[in-house]
Amino acid sequence: MPDQLEIDNLTVSFGAEGAPPVLDGVSLGVAKGEVLAIVGESGSGKSMTAMSVMKLLPRGARMKAGGIRFDGVDILGADERTMNRIRGDRVSMLFQQPKRMLDPTATVGRQVAEPLRRYAGLSRHKAADRVIELLSDVGIAEPERRAKAYAHQLSGGIAQRVMIAMALAGEPELLIADEPTTALDVTVEVQVLRLIATKRAELGMSVLFISHDLGVVSSLADRIAVMYAGRIVEVGTTDQILRQPQHPYTRSLIKCAT
Ligand code: ADP
Ligand code: MG
């Protein structure tokens, strides 16, 4: 069976013709239900890879070569309508700064309800009930009170739980998490990682989990891809990468983590 997500020779550059690419022939596959982690230092191309899958590259980025298929759909060739449907409920994304992703002028409840009304077509009343269920489902205590709160009244950990509730509301097939715990305290980080692991098991979704921290991904990932300077330098099971790293950069990561 082909992988659910297939990234093939993805090559992206910025600026002048001949400038070195920021993604240099990236190829990766994510099987249905698998957690694949991408690990690499800041600037290595992790976010660009994630944004390519969502077809949301920043202005000025040029796709020089390569292809991406999600469940057989040619992402790079897809029109906006198809992409909006995919982003609406099949592939969801989490980001590093949850508070920045929330609208400061609307309550949490209204923001979580919005996609339920728009995509799932729930009535105002049904959506409000579902919001409380979703918030409580991601471990938010007193969900009724939190639903009335604004982003600035939330801690980073609670805000990320709200983002997870929103990302999972449509029961996506693939979750892309781009450093979702990097801005959190260590104890909160552990809780959020556990939550992602639990939800993944419940929903059977695949996860593309991005981090600069090998220690963070090792508890969660089935396989790890190591990225360096726009290339995937090594891919293997979590065990292989931790016990028998082949690439010097991977070895240096492991030294730093211990
Ligand atoms: P990571 O997520 O691994 O930290 P990114 O994928 O964000 O790295 O960035 C990869 C490379 O692309 C970096 O060298 C960065 O400088 C470059 N880059 C990212 N966004 C832009 C942009 N808007 N304009 C020019 N270069 C960019
Ligand atoms: Mg990044």
Image (spheres, rainbow, N blue to C red):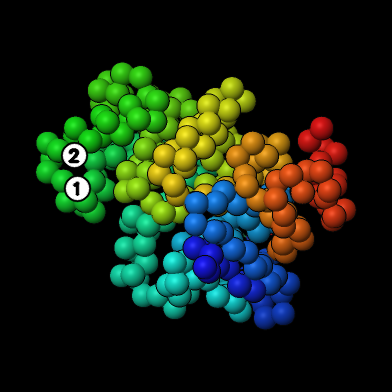
Q: Residue at x 65, y 50 (%)?
A: 223
Q: Are marks 2 and 1 in contact (CB under 8 Å)?
A: yes
Residue 86 at what x, y percent from top left? 36, 62
Does any portion of residue 190 appear in the rendered image?
Answer: yes
**Label drawn at residue 49:** none
Element type where label 2 sits in the image = helix
- In the drawing, does residue 109 fall left or right of residue 236? left
Residue 79 at what x, y percent from top left? 36, 75
Does any portion of residue 52 appear in the rendered image?
Answer: no
Amino acid on which disc 1 is placed: Arg
Of the 4 image quadrants, the one containing the C terminus is top right
Element type where label 1 sits in the image = helix
Amino acid on which disc 2 is placed: Ala
> Looking at the rendering, which quadrant does residue 12 occupy?
bottom right
Q: Residue at x 53, y 27 (%)?
A: 191
**Would you call the spot at circle 2 few (<14 residues within 10 Å), some (14-19), or many (20 or more)?**
many
User: Which comes sooner in the sequence, label 2 or label 1?
Assistant: 1
The residue identified by callout 1 is 117
Q: Residue at x 78, y 43 (%)?
A: 242
Mark 2–mark 1 distance (CA, rounded to whole Å): 6 Å
Q: Is residue 100 above or below residue 137?
A: below
What residue occupies the far right of the structure in this picture? 248
The residue identified by callout 2 is 127
Of 100 and 158, nearer the camera is 158
Q: Is residue 84 above or below residue 123?
A: below
